[in-house]
Image: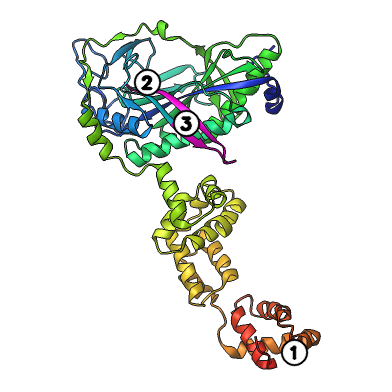
Amino acid sequence: MSTEATVDFDEALTRYDPALGFEVHIELNTKTKMFSDAPNEFGDLANTNVTPVDLGLPGTLPVVNGKAIEYSIKLGLALNCSIAESCRFARKNYFYPDNPKNFQTSQYDEPIAFEGWLDIELESGRVIHVEIERAHMEEDAGKLTHLGGADGRIQGAQTSLVDYNRAGVPLVEIVTKPILGVGADAPELGRRYVSAIRDIVKALDVSDARMERGNVRCDANVSLMPKGSTTLGTRSETKNVNSLRSIERAVRHEIERHAAILDAGESVVQETRHWHEDTRTTSSGRPKSDADDYRYFPEPDLVPVVTSRERVEEIRATLPELPAARRARLQVDWGFSDEEFRDIVNAGLLEAIEETVAAGATPAAARKWWMGEISRLAKDTEKEATELGILPADVVEIEGLIAGKKINDKIAKKVLTAVAAGEGRPGQIVEAKGLAVVSDDGPLLAAIEDAMAGAPDVVEKIKAGKVAAIGALIGPVMKATRGQADAGRVRELVLQKLGVQG
């Protein structure tokens, strides 16, 4: 059978339990590379940020970047890892065109950080404890550009160009232990785990963390075990997935693909896979080597990295508030329930609401507008809420206009639509479009007279003491004033006119 055949995801889970593992690569944003003084800059002209060390020329010797070691320790601490007092680099031997030395300087049996963990909360509220085996330092490879194919991938290409600007960029690779028992939550866990790593490195400011640039890349390992088995299946490794959405989709697809292979009585091949976002499928890369195949041995040109306990504690003292602690603090400060706060996080609006509160809005008002009308506009335009051009300051300005009784909630929604359309800031739009609430009693009284004339039965109910019936008059008045009447003032005038106590 074709290895590209798949089984429905839910059906696959009736027969198999997935086992996951993630290797997340973080490019550090140091000024220079891991073992040379070449600039660590993205987007420069190809093959300009290189030195003889990066190209592996004979007679060159590497020198470890001290700032990269500090950043690696910071990251290890943020991942709840133990930090090695002494660790060393090793040579990982393999040939690939973007690896000019024919080996990668990495860490093997002596990583700088080990035995860590992260708790990952899913949309359902379920928390999954992910154990981290290691976080080790290494250097990135160069970048290949494939030409002559239909889609820029290596499949079908006739020529490949190599840019060594990325060769030697400092990396930290974070490797989990096997993650079991996640079931149908496996795809979401992949997305949220990598998202948590990205949030941490952004908070630490040790990486630009831009996935579209490859600053954060994930290798997703997937295998299946028949229900009741405790023996891990053969894994596939989908390489260098660089978007959160793609990580989730890749894990789901590989579960469906593995199930089809096992259902047919065939064996899963241990290999790397390439993810194709356009078709949401993977394709075969190369047979996946085990550690022995890389012929690791200690790097003879570098001395061990020795870090004192005192130095580790000095670095620990510089750590900023980490994302999990920040979320817990904000929930308490804002007074939101678990469900309310989880909805904000799931919507990706935590930063927007935090900035809006910092700009002067109440937490309730910030949540109301971002989770309500702004999210609705985003859905209608198929954009992210933070991509609409609506700023935290706009929400604060709208709240101020409402508090000053210059607009009401209905008008505020029109104003937000205009802001998203690029027509200006809220105050400008209200003035230019004449959207201010009608506060002149003259026009309001005229509209009230018409409404009362059209509903004499409602008038009699109000006179009889059924004040709640006044809503039947407020509606027509709002319609007559294009929604620009102050509903509270309309209510006051109706009661005054009828001589009824509110």
**Labels 2, 1: front one:** 1
Q: Is residue 198 visible?
A: yes
Residue depicted at 55% across the width and 57% down the height: 374
Instruction: Choose the circle earlier in sequence order: 2 or 1.
Output: 2
Q: Residues within 10 Å of mark 2 (few under 14, many from 20)?
A: some
Q: What separation in Å lies between label 3 and label 1 (alpha carbons)?
A: 68 Å
Report the predominant secondary structure element of the magenta stretch: strand
Residue 4 visible from this viewpoint: no
Residue 453 at x, y percent in the picture = 76, 89
Query: Which segment did they paint magenta?
Result: 118-138
Residue 463: mark in rendering: 1
Residue 419 x %, y %: 50, 62
Q: What residue is pinned by disc 2?
A: 162
- Check the image and report above or below for 486 versus 105: below
Q: Residues within 10 Å of mark 3 (few under 14, many from 20)?
A: many
The numbered mark, 3 or 1, whose residue comes first in the sequence reads: 3
Which of the two residues, 267 or 312, is positioned nearer the viewer here?
Answer: 312
Return the mark for residue 242.
Answer: 3
Crowding at label 1, few (<14), some or many (≥20) Cα neighbours within 10 Å?
some
Q: Amino acid at mark 1?
A: Lys
Disc 3 marks a residue whose amino acid type is Asn
The answer for how far apart the CA atoms under marks 2 and 1 are is 85 Å
Please tell me whether mark 3 or mark 1 is closer to you in this view. Answer: 1
Query: Residue 349: where, in percent of width, then height?
Result: 49, 50
Q: Which residue is found at the position 41% from the left and 6% from the top?
A: 292
Label 2: which secondary element: strand
Q: Residue at horizontal 68%, vertical 17%?
A: 260
